[in-house]
Image (cartoon, helix red, strand yellow):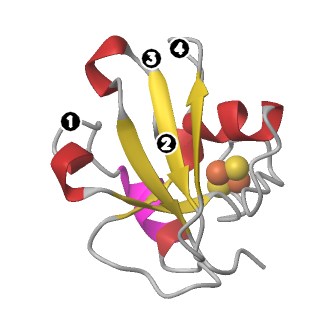
Amino acid sequence: PEITFVQPDGRRVKLAVRAGDSAMLAALRSQVRGIIGECGGSMACATCHVYVDDAWLGRIAPVSPAEDEMLGATAAPRRANSRLACQIEMSDSLDGIVLEVAEAQL
Ligand code: FES
């Protein structure tokens, strides 16, 4: 599957990723600017905050209570489409997903 990351300045980068990887890991591997993933995906840092394009929101597993708590502690404002990229597991059904990188992570 592919992911498009959109930077706060509008620049876009499209990556081919492995099914089963999180969007956070895929971003780190390709050094996508603005995705830090400090805690390695254990929902303890909120430095992988992204805004999910509305077309894809309903296809991702719902926000768990732990993710919801971390989304309350993001550096950039939380929006209705805020998610932690480490909790987005890539699969063919998410092929083409568009994720906007939050403007601040720390
Ligand atoms: Fe730390 Fe996602 S990588 S919460």
* Mark whose residue sits in front, 1 or 3: 3
Mark 4 — residue? 20
Q: Which comes before the other along the chain, label 4 or label 1?
A: 4
Q: Which residue is mark 3?
A: 1
- Estimate how packed mark 1 is, as few (under 14), some (14 to 19) or many (20 or more) residues with alpha carbons within 10 Å: few
Q: Is residue 13 magenta?
A: no
Q: Residues within 10 Å of mark 3 (few under 14, many from 20)?
A: some
* 68 is within the stretch colored magenta: yes
- How crowded pointer 2 is (Cα within 10 Å; few <14, some 14-19, many 20+) is rated as some
x, y percent for residue 36: 79, 57
Q: List the residue tagged with mark 1.
A: 59
Question: Disc 2 marks which amino acid?
Answer: Thr
Secondary structure found at label 1: loop
Which numbered disc, 2 or 1, marks the residue closer to the eye?
Answer: 2
Seen from the viewer's position, the closer of residues 97 and 89 is: 97
N-terminal label among 2 and 1: 2
Q: Secondary structure at mark 2?
A: strand
The picture places residue 51, in percent across and down from the top left corner, at 42, 64
Q: Nearer the viewer, mark 2 or mark 4?
A: 2
Q: Position of residue 75 (x, y in %)?
A: 65, 84
Q: CA distance from mark 4 to mark 3?
A: 10 Å
C-alpha separation, residue under disc 2 versus residue under disc 3 = 10 Å
Q: Amino acid at mark 1?
A: Arg
Q: Alpha-carbon neighbours of circle 4 within 10 Å: few (<14), some, or many (≥20)? A: few
Magenta residues (range) = 64-69
Residue ID for mark 2: 4
